[in-house]
Image (tube, rainbow, N blue to C red):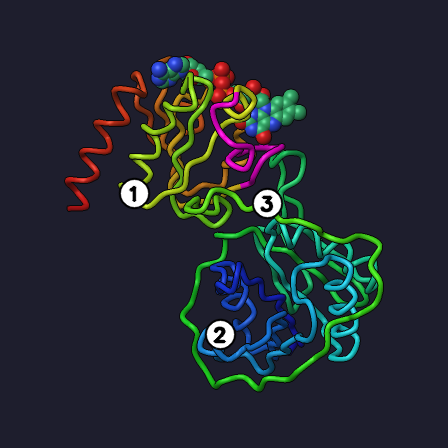
Amino acid sequence: MAKIGIYIELDKGTFKKSNRELLSLARQGGHEVCAVMFCADAAPYLDELKGVRTVIQVSGGDLSYQPDRYARTLAALIAEHRLEVLLGSCSAQGKDLFPRLAAMAGAGLVNDCLAVDPAARKAVKPVYSGKLLAEYQVEGGCALFTVRPNVIPVQPAAGAAPEVRAAAMDSGDTPTRIVEVIQAAAQRIDLTEAEIIVSGGRAMKAKENFAVLEDLAQALGAGVGASRAAVDAGFAASDMQVGQTGKVVNPKLYIACGISGAIQHFVGMKTSKVIVAINKDPEAPIFKKADYGIVGDLFTVVPLLKEEIKKVLG
Ligand SMILES: Cc1cc2nc3c(=O)[nH]c(=O)nc-3n(C[C@H](O)[C@H](O)[C@H](O)COP(=O)(O)OP(=O)(O)OC[C@H]3O[C@@H](n4cnc5c(N)ncnc54)[C@H](O)[C@@H]3O)c2cc1C
């Protein structure tokens, strides 16, 4: 039985879906699970944390995300609680925090895992732009893993309520400090956690035309993404970019509209469960990768699709 820690990520106080995935993974196999969260009060989240043995609530002072202070606090907690494994989400914050933590704690790290066996300290992750899957094993010290959102099925929280223990935030000086966080547009769905994504490419031709995709996305409860060509042309915001130099997404359904299917885009969405491509060129490479293809002009097809989906969903 391993002693497994989970770094719980809150988004403006909201318990992120990726936490539920990590908890589902850690609860398998009867391990001793310990959740670490940085918040003034863990009580509102305890229902989500059933089955976890201990919740370490880090509080005191400024709790805003400051990478060095968070990493030093976590490194101290790993040592104090003798955690053998620490899991986190491969989110923007996870990708920033875990490498610092690995350096501070002298721990091994595997980022962006598609599967993790915590007891064996093993993980599988894509390498070479997703061309290969490699298996890693972390030896010695605490094994750190960040897991790609949406790869682990969520099991409902079950079991006894956890014991809550208080811990103090590191108060030392920090060489780097986040001075401002610029929020994305208010209602935008986080693409890395979205279950459905509708994306547009260069074929969108103008920023205003993304309204066509937003209508479809609204009917589906989906997030809206974009290819780099669409972002570079100023049709879409940079936080919407999917691909090698954008976000890696893993939804249940990915609808690519007017996107050719270049490898750099494909690596960002290839693990989507179902890929639908809409393209007017029947030879477009995206059709070789899609589960379903519609040959046609997206400005005709997308509104029709929206109407049909609305009928089906009532
Ligand atoms: C180092 C590097 C990193 C990169 N990183 C990324 C990345 O992260 N993400 C990314 O997306 N790209 C990335 N790229 C760019 C990538 O190589 C492609 O250039 C880009 O993905 C192409 O975008 P696109 O498919 O929208 O445009 P295009 O390749 O121009 O394709 C447009 C498609 O729209 C179709 N079309 C046109 N009009 C219509 C219409 N009315 N209806 C339906 N279909 C229509 C066309 O047939 C065509 O297939 C990167 C490139 C490099 C070199």
Q: Secondary structure at mark 2?
A: helix
Q: For the residue marked with disc 2, what is the amino acid?
A: Tyr
Q: Secondary structure at mark 3?
A: loop
Does residue 51 sit above or below 105 in this rendering?
below
Are there few (<14), some (14-19), or many (20+) residues within 10 Å of tag 1? some
Q: For the residue marked with disc 1, what is the amino acid?
A: Leu
Q: Which residue is mark 2?
A: 45
The magenta-colored residue range is: 234-248
Residue 173: percent from left, percent from top: 84, 63
Specify whether residue 1 is painted magenta: no
User: In the image, is 45 to the left or to the right of 113?
Assistant: left
Q: For the residue marked with disc 3, what is the amino acid?
A: Ile
Q: Which residue is mark 3?
A: 182
Pointer 1 or 3: first along the chain: 3
- Residue lying at 78% horizontally and 55% vertically, measured from the top left: 100
Residue 288: percent from left, percent from top: 43, 24
Q: Secondary structure at mark 1?
A: helix
Q: Which residue is mark 1?
A: 220
The Cα–Cα distance between marks 2 and 3, rounded to whole angstroms, is 26 Å
Does residue 176 sit above or below 312 in this rendering?
below
